Amino acid sequence: MEDQRKPEKNKTSTTSNLLWFFGVSTCVKLLLIPSYHSTDFEVHRNWLAITHSLPLDQWYIDKTSPWTLDYPPFFAYFEYIISFFAHLVDPKIVDLEKGLDYKAESVVLFQRLSVIVCDLVLLYGVYRLSKNFSMGFKERVLMWVLVVWSPGLVIVDHMHFQYNGFLLGLLMMSISYMMEGRDLMGGFVFAVLLCFKHLFAVAAPVYFVYLLRHYCWKGFVKGFWRISVLGAVVVAVFAAAYGPFVYHGQMQKVIGRMFPFGRGLCHAYWAPNFWVFYIILDKGLAFLLKKLGLNIPVPAASFTGGLVGDSSPFAILPQVTPLTTFIMVLLALSPCLIKAWKNPQPRSVPRWIAYAYMCGFLFGWHVHEKASLHFVIPLAIVAGNSLEDARHYFLLSIVSCYSLFPLLYEAQEYPIKVLLLLLHSVLMWQSFSALFTKDATAKAVVSAKKTDRQVGLKGSSSDVVEKGGFCIGWIGRCYLFGLLAVEIWGQFLHPYLLGDKLPFVPLLLISIYCALEIMYSWIWQLRQIVVSP
């Protein structure tokens, strides 16, 4: 009888503890309601007005505001549903003409609260991952700290303003089903996610290969039946999303809005990815050759304005097209796809999916800096698997959050974002230290050395621990001190020494320095995937 009661007690304890974590984060989010918000706030308010005021066949045509609807149909339906509640709060919120740039307290409160409520989807995704697997209490707490208390989500969703928590909650749900072996449900939820936000499609090749090999590759008859069922489920989801627009002959408009390739290779603020180095190399070569007397036509695109438009800004290096980036992402993904085909292990799904999103972040077209959340949040699931995973995640999480700092450029938000990052860094350190005690660390080092010898690699496991416990090593410490130097220069020394001269330098330094860590992280993850059994 006692053994039967124990799982139920643990389940109740997990739920209550997770709700406490979520309650604390909700209190912080409520305090941030009056804080700065970006133009994305008006974007989503306008989408409320479009879906509430216009018939469905005009949603992807309307140009009343420059902030046109460019998300897939499920997100449009989502805006349509909550627009009725917005109308009850303040009818002007959903007024297509009078609501333009509406900034009353009612609209601020409603939209802020809508994001907080939608975070319940993230809560459920984390809950599923917490309750369904043999995690100890420390592992659960670690995941809650990394996901529920993520400073990146707070900055992007509850200050800058978006609904990433809601969407990442769907991703976490899909991953939880896949790790349980419920592949059909995992594929269904992922298809739903793609119809909410198409940028998550970067992981679609991983899902396709894994589901084909793990779920459908079961002999001719059974395999044919399963692939038919899986295909029917995916088709049904996409039919529900896009069917009405096909009926109205709007698909060309919908696709055109969702994939505006004319926006250019990079966003206005450069995401810290591979293209930062490519751009800097091109600019440097152009400058050098011009100094040598060569007539080099330097494009007008600036560091501050970003690379936006149909023409490529490169003067020396080959021009980059959307097809080029697509091929590069697929090539970067190929080792992961091969591993997923050869050895489709459910426990590896979070790492593969996170790796796919990192490939899209590093090599994709018009990548937003906010997309780093797409790989940082799933990686939290495996951050406690080993000491090396913990060290890797600790640095990556800090860099990902720091790369979001330029989103909040007003002075009054500066102490908030710094405090969020510092507090989260301390909580991560404490959580990893509690998980990897002196004895556990020694065992992890011995295990890592054995693995390195088995795969013929020279690892750095011996420098992980000298005095015992969680440690990031001297290279990690040096990198973090460099990050501090970049911030001190951009925030204090540059304005004092140079004033208004070279205004692009602080952003440039952030992009380059953060890109170094993310590129290293990509290589590290690739190595982990390749050498894993």
Image (tube, rainbow, N blue to C red):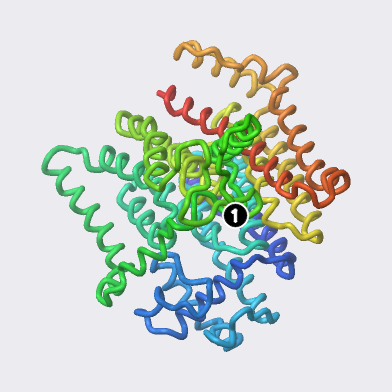
Instruction: Decide which of 65, 196 is in the foreground and name it.
Output: 65
- Relative to 508, is 46 on the left or the right? left
Q: Which amino acid does label 1 sit on?
A: Ala
Residue 518 in view of the camera: no
Q: Please report the residue visible at 48 percent of the width from the left and 74 percent of the height from the top.
A: 79
Q: Mark 1: which secondary structure?
A: loop
Instruction: Decide which of 280, 49 is in the foreground and name it.
Output: 280
Instruction: Decide which of 523, 27 is in the foreground and name it.
Output: 523
If the image is split into quadrants, where does the C terminus sit?
top left
* Rendered location of residue 299, percent (x, y): 56, 48
**Relative height, residue 384 to residue 193 (above, below):** above
| Residue lying furthest right | 496
* Rendered location of residue 511, percent (x, y): 64, 42
Q: Residues within 10 Å of mark 1 (few under 14, many from 20)?
A: some
Q: Quadrant of residue 37?
A: bottom right
Residue under label 1, please give it: 268
**Relative height, residue 10 to residue 91 (above, below):** above
* Rendered location of residue 43, percent (x, y): 56, 71
Q: Please report the residue visible at 54 percent of the width from the left and 32 percent of the height from the top.
A: 385
Q: Please report the residue visible at 41 percent of the width from the left and 57 percent of the height from the top.
A: 198
* Rendered location of residue 243, percent (x, y): 27, 70
**Relative height, residue 386 to residue 302 (above, below):** above
Q: Please report the residue visible at 65 percent of the width from the left and 62 percent of the height from the top.
A: 160
Q: Quadrant of residue 51?
A: bottom left
Instruction: Decide which of 213, 398 is in the foreground and name it.
Output: 398
